[in-house]
Image (cartoon, helix red, strand yellow):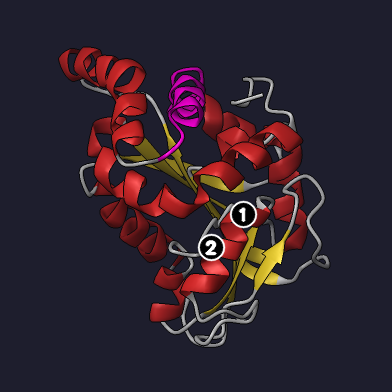
Amino acid sequence: MTRAQLDKQPGEVAAMFDRTARRYDLVNDVISLGQVRLWRKAVAAAVDAGPGELVLDLGAGTGTSTDAFTTLGARAIASDFSLGMLRTGVRRHGGNALSGDGVPFIAGDALRLPFADDSFDAVTISVALRNVHDTSQALREMLRVTKPGGRLAVLEFSHVTFGPFDLVYREYLMRLLPKVAKVFGSNDDSYEYLAESIRDWPDQRTLARTIQQAGWERVAWRNLTMGIVALHRGFKPA
């Protein structure tokens, strides 16, 4: 099998990301026209974690997103279920599972997180929630490992809010994205899956409702880049 299916069986999705790991960060930067860097900063600002706080960066891949939290002085754990992504991240952070800047890389399934209850001041997941087999269960697991009063930040591809641009964006997404990935040496079959998973993902309001139903309160969102992605926030009841 060369690509994952949209029923998002964990083994298929993990294998897909294993194959794309080496070029994943480069291709993301190219296909987003550099916007991914601004999105990471927006997530870090929303989480607003400082010294003494512990952040779980779920679906962290190579740990590029995790660096945004440690830069602000917080401690952070990078967790992902793709061993290929984690290995790439470990190499880029000095060759040890506990990197030189103090970021542990830990293999973990979002549906059964290997962490104790009430462990983290904040939990975040960026452009990875749609790849999880059971969205609601993953959100409940994130709630479980977050301290009372702690916060959640979910960055995910969403629905463009400007109609004329939406037509252009969808054409790029479905036709050009896999071709661009292939040019830069990544697995174009994987990016066909990613394009389809973005297209089929629910809109901002529907995701907010799912987060709230999982037990998070004060759920809100804001659109970035005209709704190409949306940043949802929530809090665990104190």
Does residue 230 sit above or below 177 in this rendering? below
Numbered disc 1: secondary structure: helix
Quadrant the N terminus occupies: top right
Judge from the rendering whether residue 215 lies leftward or rightward of residue 227; answer left or right.
Answer: right
Numbered disc 2: secondary structure: helix
Looking at this rendering, what residue extends furthest in the left direction?
164
Judge from the rendering whether residue 196 lies leftward or rightward of residue 16; answer left or right.
Answer: left
Residue 53 x/y as whole percent:
57, 80
The residue depicted at 41 percent of the width and 50 percent of the height is 23
The residue depicted at 75 percent of the width and 36 percent of the height is 11
172 or 21, which lies in front? 21
Q: Which residue is mark 1?
A: 84
Judge from the rendering whether residue 73 lies leftward or rightward of residue 208; answer left or right.
Answer: left
Residue 237 x/y as whole percent:
69, 56
Is 204 magenta? The answer is yes
The residue depicted at 29 percent of the width and 35 percent of the height is 183
Q: Which residue is mark 2?
A: 88
199 or 17, which lies in front? 17
Quadrant the C terminus occupies: bottom right
Judge from the rendering whether residue 78 lies leftward or rightward of residue 157; answer left or right.
Answer: right
Q: Is residue 208 visible?
A: yes
**Res 37 quadrant in image:** bottom left
Q: Is residue 235 visible?
A: no
- Answer whether labels 1 and 2 touch (C-beta < 8 Å): yes
Q: What amino acid does circle 1 point to?
A: Gly
C-alpha span from label 1 to label 2: 6 Å
Residue 44 x/y as whole percent:
40, 64
Q: What amino acid does circle 2 point to?
A: Thr
Is 50 magenta? The answer is no
Magenta-tinted stretch: 186-205
Does residue 100 sit above or below 150 in this rendering? below
Magenta span main SS: helix
